[in-house]
Image (cartoon, grey):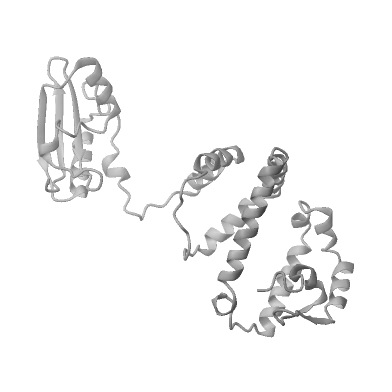
Amino acid sequence: MYIYTPYTYLIGWSKLNKWYYGCSYKSKTKIANPEQLWKSYFTSSKKVKQFRKLHGEPDIIQIRKTFNTAEDALKWESKVILRMKMVESDIFLNQRNMSGQFKNKGGYKHSEKSKENYRKSFTDERRITISKRLKGVKRKSTKGYKRSEESKENYRKSFTDERRRFLSELSVETNKNRTKESRQAAGKSNSKTRKENREKYIGENSPLFGINRTEEDKTSIAIGTKEAMDDPALREHLSEKAKLRCTPEWRAKKAEENKYRICCIKCHREMGRSSLGKHRMGRKCI
């Protein structure tokens, strides 16, 4: 077992007058230690790897300095590379000085221009490619993760009308290519999942169990829903049936229906007449 010891080193081909100055500081995948140099560690430089294939192993291998922390090692490497102007020199294989500048401890902030360029790089075609590549890959759960208000707002803004139309067309095109067996299998799977979720969150297990909303909360939710449904940009991508539900006439009709309350014969839950179709009198009791 090696003792963690970050260090800087120099390797060279003296006959060719070619040199490389580097730093080893990893502590997770490989434990940095001077004893590993040119035994199990051969630098992370692609340039050095190519040079070795063409000209063989270096005849100069030196440990230049050892350190207690990775930060100290990186700072020293950066200092030496800058002082010797290795990146500009023809005799050194160092291509860039990244050590001291790009060791991010979590406090680095991107500029607004950098953020905008990053957002633009995620085109719909790129998202589809990433989605296909990640199919079947087990992902880390985001349960319990709370997004900041800025993150939520950026996510909402990303769903432009153009993107909604694209996703809608993509969904239609995808469904056209599905076989009858594939549709039936997906239907059974979804039905099973819904049933399991219903059983999982019945009664006291429901996240809304015991919560009594105030009249102020109810009014706020109602106003928010109405404003959202009155937004023409939101209604543009809806089906004709869904658009019909946004009309004042449809709302008035449902309000009239909901004046009459109905009780389920199985779970004894009380509901308006408009909810009867969803509940199906006992077949969807929760």
The percent position of residue 61, horizontal first and vertical second, equals: 11, 28
From this viewpoint, is residue 286 visible?
A: yes
Q: Residue at x 22, y 49 (%)?
A: 71
Left or right of 273: which side holds 71?
Answer: left
Tell me where residue 87 appears, x and y as whole percent: 27, 29
Residue 47 percent coordinates (x, y) = 28, 25
The residue closer to the viewer here, 175 or 13, is 175
Whole-percent x and y of residue 52? 22, 21
| Residue located at (48% from left, 63% from top) | 143
Depth check: give the residue in front, 266 or 239.
266
The quadrant where residue 201 appears: bottom right
In the image, is residue 26 above or below residue 88?
A: below
Looking at the image, residue 208 lies above or below residue 176: below
* Camera-nearest residue between 248 and 177: 177
Q: Please, is residue 215 above or below residue 54 in the view? A: below
Q: Residue at x 64, y 50 (%)?
A: 186
Determine which quarter of the picture holds residue 124.
top right
Looking at the rendering, in which quadrant would you find the C terminus? bottom right
Say whether residue 167 is visible: no
Position of 272 with respect to 36 (left or right) is: right
Labels in figure, total: 0
1 relative position to 117: left or right = left
Is 225 on the left or on the right of 69, as rendered? right
